[in-house]
Each structure stands twice: as C-alpha cells, then as structure tokens.
Amino acid sequence: MPTLRLAIVGAGPAGIYAADILLREAHAYDVSIDLFEQLPAPYGLVRYGVAPDHPRIKGIINALRDVLDSGHIRIFGNVEYGKDITLDDLKQHYNAVVFSTGAVKDADLDVPGVELEGSYGAAEFVSWFDGHPDVPRTWPLTAESVAVIGNGNVALDVSRILAKHADDLLPTEVPDNVYQGLKASPVTDVHVFGRRGPAQVKFTPLELRELGEVPDVDVVVYDEDFDHDEASLTAIQTNKQVMVIDRVLQQWRKREPGTASRRLHLHFYAKPLEFVGDDQGRVAAIRYERTRPNGQGGVEGTGEVREIPIQAAYRAVGYFGSPLPGLPFDERRGVIPNHEGQVLDDDNQQMPGVYATGWIKRGPVGLIGHTKSDAMETVQHIVNDQAQWWTPVDPSDEAVPALLRERGVEYTDLDGWHRLDEHEIALGAPHGRARVKVVPREEMVDASLGRIEAPSADTSRAGADQV
C-alpha cells in the first residue's frame, strides 16, 4: 500500500476536519498526518474567535478533540510556519501540505477617522477577550458610549461582550485579565450600525436572541427601521431564518422602555460616513447617512446625515487572510489563489503538492458545515493528485521532531495540549468555572511541557490572578 505523508499548517477546525476526512477517505493509502500550529493550543478560532459565553458553539471542540485523540494524527504546537519550519522543509519530509491558516485580521473599513485613537478592529478585540497570547493583556475600556460597525455574528459578539456585566461572564472560561478589564468598564450604551435593513442582516437567530437574554441590558430598536419594502417582505415570508429574526425584532419593538443600567441599540439603514475626532485625536462621534431600500434588495442613500456622540468604535466588517512565505496571495480577497483547494502559482498553474482549505481558501464566509464540505473538496483533489505529490528525502517519523529540536523550537505535542487543558480546568474548578484560560504564551508552553505542577485548590486562585 503506497504511503501518503501529509503536513497540515493550521490546527483550527479547517485543518482538523481535513485530517479527519483524509483518514476516512484515503483507503488506498497508508496515511500519516502531522498538524503544525503556531499557538501552543489547537482549535484556532473556536478557541480564540468565539465569545466565552457561547458554550454551545464551543461544544464543537468536543468533536475536534475526538479527531485529535484518535491516535492517527501528530500535532506540533508553538511552531510558526515561515520561521520555525518552511515550505522547503515540508518538501523534504512530506508528500504534500495543506494550508488551513484561516483569516485573523480585520478587513478594512474605508471611512475618514478610522485611524483615530479609540477606533479598533473587532478581530483584535475578540482575540483579547478570548485570551489570545499574542495580543496585549489590557484593553482601553474607558468609553461610556460605543459604536460597533457591522451586522454579522462578530458584531453581535463584540456588542454583547461590551454591554454585558463582567460578573455574568464568570461561569465561563473568560481569562481573569479580561474579567478585570470588563468589570472596570464604564459603558452605558452600545450602538450597532448596519447599512442595510433588518431583513438583510448576516447574523443568525441564535446570536440575536442571546442579546435579549443579557441581564440588566435593554435592547433598543427603532420603529423607523421596520417600514419594509417588497423585497424585505418576500425575504421574511420565504426564508425561515429571516422570519425568525423578524419575529424576535418585532417582539422587541413591543417592549416598554426598560430601566436597565446598560442599553444596546440596533440601528439599521445606517451607513457609516466618518468617525469624528476631538482636538486630541480621539474618537468623539460617529457620523452616518440614513439609507433606504432601493427596491432591488439593496439600499441607497437618502442624503440625511446623523451624528451620535461616542468615545470608541469597533469595526466588525469581516476578517481578512494573511500572506504566507513561499506562497502566492490574492491581496484583494485575502486568500491563497486556488482551484477547489489546489493552490495556483502566479501563472495560474497548479503548484505541485500544495493545497488550501478553510477561510484562507475561500475567504471568511460560511459556518462550520461549510468548513467540512470545503475540506472534502480539497481532500478529494489530494487523493487524486498522486502524480503532483512531492517525493520526500526523509519521511521518517523522527525527522521533523529532530529538525525542530536542532533549531531550538520548544514545540508542544498532543500530550502537552492535554496537560495544558487539565491545567486550565484545574484553575477553574475551585471557583465553579469550566476553566480559567491561560494567556501568556510562556505559561502555556510551560504547562504543556510539564514544567508547571497541576494547581491545588490553594494555588489555583493565585494562578488565575496571573493570567
């Protein structure tokens, strides 16, 4: 039976699903898979891109864990592609490589004032409140009134975390530095802006309903946004998801004005024009144009300009991929150029042995179900492309660990992830929490390599205070 030795760069859902599908589909080969991940922990955006108060979504981790624990996949964590290991290295030890590095940067929002102090990308804020080790430990939560630009799930996550009282996050895995930062926040009003109407939003009913369940936070909607045109009415009548969203919003319209200490305002038909700065170069207001339906499912400007005082703005208008050393990159779309996962070079020809899956392949769209079908498409090409594979010089199991040790890379493996996982759970257990996520990279590596003893009940509080 011929051997297929595969490297996968990126241990988020896309990479793990690709590994799982390949193990199940490549019956004609003796398959060996190594996952490379730049962070000491796996799971990508499921760990670092989903709000901590989403336990149902984080349940995806259980399925991903089963794949990693199947015994057929090795993982090398804390290994940065392009620095610790290169494309040339991978060619020496594998038949092919799949890049599943996702999209972690913010897409651009081209409005004046975006550079002002107090203007933030949502992706970086999400990384902060999810305890990503490579972002600052503190966040400047000093604003009383905040704007969030976008009508997708990330915008709702950011808005909900900003508006929610920190104590209501304590049952989750929220890192302690994040809890302390949010607890000191003086926020009273969060304004969410979308340029289209409520029948054209991109968030899901589950995300929307959760807004109405946040304690001591009133959700405010405005009657002027519900004069539906024919296209919106058709969407509500024919699309179940839109129908549910409309039902939730209509229920909120009927609510009496609340007395909560915080308010979350949903502004539809609101196109951001400018972040207005004060004389210190800080965000002081958002200026936006009122839009209206254009009769074709889109919107057009009305010329009516409004302004709301704010002290911070978060841009949640999408994610964007990052270029990778040795690979072509589409600067406009933020993806690796490819045909159904087969990476294409600058001459639009297939690069032998190089594949992509997930957001770095198709852009930051779709949910987990799309990621699985996306991986299946890529895997089918890998299996059928034997003539395009590399011929590795040294495909032995020990070659890559030896190479990393020679370069002084403190890589973590699956056993190391289990140790870190148990360490975080032990930190949270005495306080009735699912876990306390460890934030510093050095501490993550130390826990993974067994250089930190499992915390006892007496020491776990101290450990939590250090993250």
Image (spheres, rainbow, N blue to C red):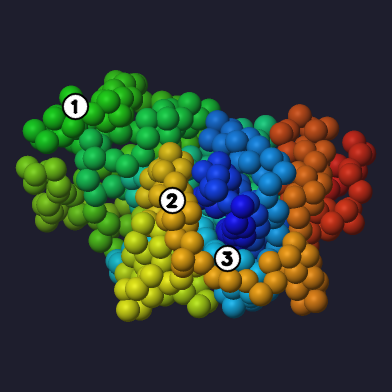
The residue depicted at 9 percent of the width and 44 percent of the height is 296
* Distance of label 1 from label 2 (alpha carbons): 35 Å
Residue 300's label in the rendered image is none
Q: How many marks?
A: 3
Q: Quick check: can you spot residue 432?
A: yes
Amino acid at the residue labelled 2: Gln
The image quadrant that residue 232 belongs to is top left
Amino acid at pointer 3: Asn
Tell me which amino acid carries mark 1: Thr
Query: Which residue does the image show at 12% across and 52% down from the upper left?
Result: 300
In x, y percent, where is residue 220? Answer: 35, 33
- Read off the residue under disc 2: 380
Which one is in front, 460 or 369?
369
Q: Which of marks 1 and 3 is nearer the N terminus?
A: 3
205 or 412: which is nearer to us?
412
Upstream in sequence: badge 1 or badge 2: 1
* Element marked by disc 3: loop
Q: Name the residue under label 3.
A: 95
